[in-house]
Amino acid sequence: MATLNRPGDGDGHLCGIDTAMEVIGGKWKVLILWALHEGPERRFGELRRMVPGITEKVLASHLREMEADGIVRRVSYDEVPPRVEYGLTKAGVRLNDALEPLAAWGREVQERRGPEGAP
Amino acid sequence: MATLNRPGDGDGHLCGIDTAMEVIGGKWKVLILWALHEGPERRFGELRRMVPGITEKVLASHLREMEADGIVRRVSYDEVPPRVEYGLTKAGVRLNDALEPLAAWGREVQERRGPEGAP
DNA sequence: CTGCTCGCTCACCTCAGGGTAACCACCCAC
DNA sequence: GTGGGTGGTTACCCTGAGGTGAGCGAGCAG
């Protein structure tokens, strides 16, 4: 789906956006990313608790996709009970940084929409 | 779905992201945004041509949503044949700017993935 | 009169992403 | 033995975003 992606486009403005959108396109991915960016390493159950509403299946599949995309590192220890820890890769951290301005924009819009003075 | 949105969070890092994701969550929205950001004003058919693959129904509904979100301005002239022009609002321009780092990240990843030396 | 343009709208259909829930293998506390 | 906790997997279902195609209302070229 490289519709607007014209390599060598002199504009140099957007055109990598859809790649990024595919990576963060999952319903919960940015939330996982956010949960992951705070601690050095998170465990599965920890993430499940940090992202209320997500199911185990979806959390697992999202983590797998993010790992395949190279933004999440997965370390599993051969213990019992099993222990697996997830962390961000360099690319993941950079993605998070790239998400910051977007978050700022979102917050700005939120304030403008619902300026409830804390009831 | 304000799960992770904790207003007053001392962290001040993410937490507006999902608002932004709702706005640009549509399949073609960033492409429309990109098409819109270059010219001052675009017509419907022009946009349809600039975003190959999109259907009229989806283009219309996305434009409507983006208008409701306050990032697109719509000006319709009472002429025959009908003429309607779309442009970005201030917020839309800022959203585009906020998307830039994400696009840069996407481009970076693209290069890393498929470093084909232009066949 | 026919057909074309323009910016949509409507009715219908498809399909994949996500939700539900049960289950696995293992060990520990009770 | 029973229950709970670990990190998953598998099967199935279901909703809603998006795709398909047709048509409309008005005027103008031919």
Image (cartoon, coloured by chain):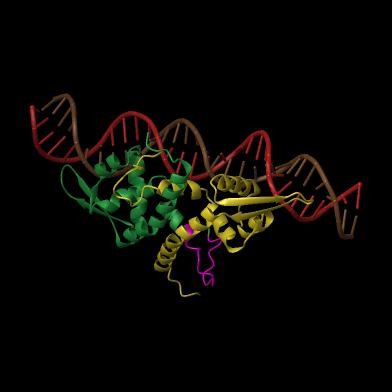
Chain colours: A yellow, B green, C brown, D red
In x, y percent, where is residue C18?
Answer: 56, 46
Q: Position of residue A105 (x, y in %)?
A: 41, 63
Residue B36: x percent and y percent? 29, 51
Give the quarter of the figure containing the N terminus of chain A: top left
- Whether residue B56 sits left or right of residue A84 in the image: it is left
Magenta stretch prevailing secondary structure? loop
Residue B44 to residue A42: above or below: above
Magenta region includes residue B118? no
Q: Is residue A30 visible?
A: no
Please state if C29 lies on the left or on the right of B12 as rendered: right
Q: From the viewer's perspective, is residue A13 above or below residue A37?
A: above
Q: Quadrant of residue A49?
A: bottom right
Left or right: C27 with respect to A6?
right
What residue is drawn where x is 39% and y is 39%? A2
Where residue A40 sits: x, y (%)?
62, 61
Region in magenta: B2-19
Question: In the figure, is residue C3 to the left or right of B25?
Answer: left
